[in-house]
Amino acid sequence: MATARKRTEHVMIRDDLAEWLHDSDPALRWQIQRDILGVPEKVWQVTRTRVATEGFGAELLARQDTGGQRAGGAIFPAGWESDTDEPQPWTGTTWALKDLREWGVDAADLGDTAQWLKANPRWEYDDLPY
């Protein structure tokens, strides 16, 4: 086990742990760089821009339906019934957009999602606009 320590303004962290954390998806990496490793803002901002084109962020962006939604629903995926024993699959539009925001995807990387969401989707309740 490595005993060397790396000092940042935020925490003391072993070098092997810092390396392991840094070897992650850009959606996590930029936040690790900023909050744990204390790297300069210029560095973590570059990593943050990669979230929309690599890894988790790119995968989630690619799963947008043609009407602007994810999995065909606002909160719940299309066809999901709440009266089953199956837990809620967190794949609906609301949860995908929440994740993209938390992962640091810039609004500009969402393309015309806002226009699609304004024109198309409906809430599952009373068929109200999303």
Image (spheres, rainbow, N blue to C red):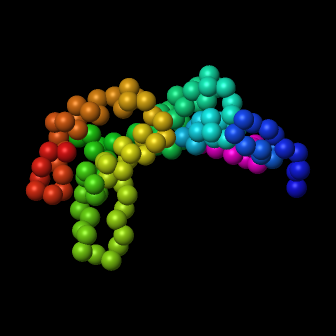
User: In this rendering, is residue 4 above or below 46?
Assistant: below
Span of residues in magenta: 17-25
Q: Quadrant of the C terminus?
A: top left
Can residue 104 be seen by looking at this rendering? yes
Query: Residue 129, percent across and down?
Result: 14, 45
Q: Is residue 22 visible?
A: no
Q: Position of residue 89 (x, y in %)?
A: 36, 62
Q: Quadrant of residue 117?
A: top left
Height in image: 1 above or below 129? below
24 left or right, relative to 73: right
Residue 122 placed where, x, y %? 17, 48
- The secondary structure making up most of the magenta span is helix
- Residue under the point 16% across and 36% down: 119
Residue 53 against residue 126 in the figure, above or below:
above
The residue positioned 33% from the left and 42% from the top of the image is 64
Q: Quadrant of residue 8?
A: top right
Q: Residue furthest top?
A: 42
* Image location (x, y in percent) of residue 19: 75, 43
The stretch drawn in magenta includes residue 92: no
From the viewer's perspective, tell me whether residue 88 is left or right of residue 120. Answer: right
**Left or right position of 16 against 29:** right
Residue appearing at x 61%, y 29% in the figure: 44
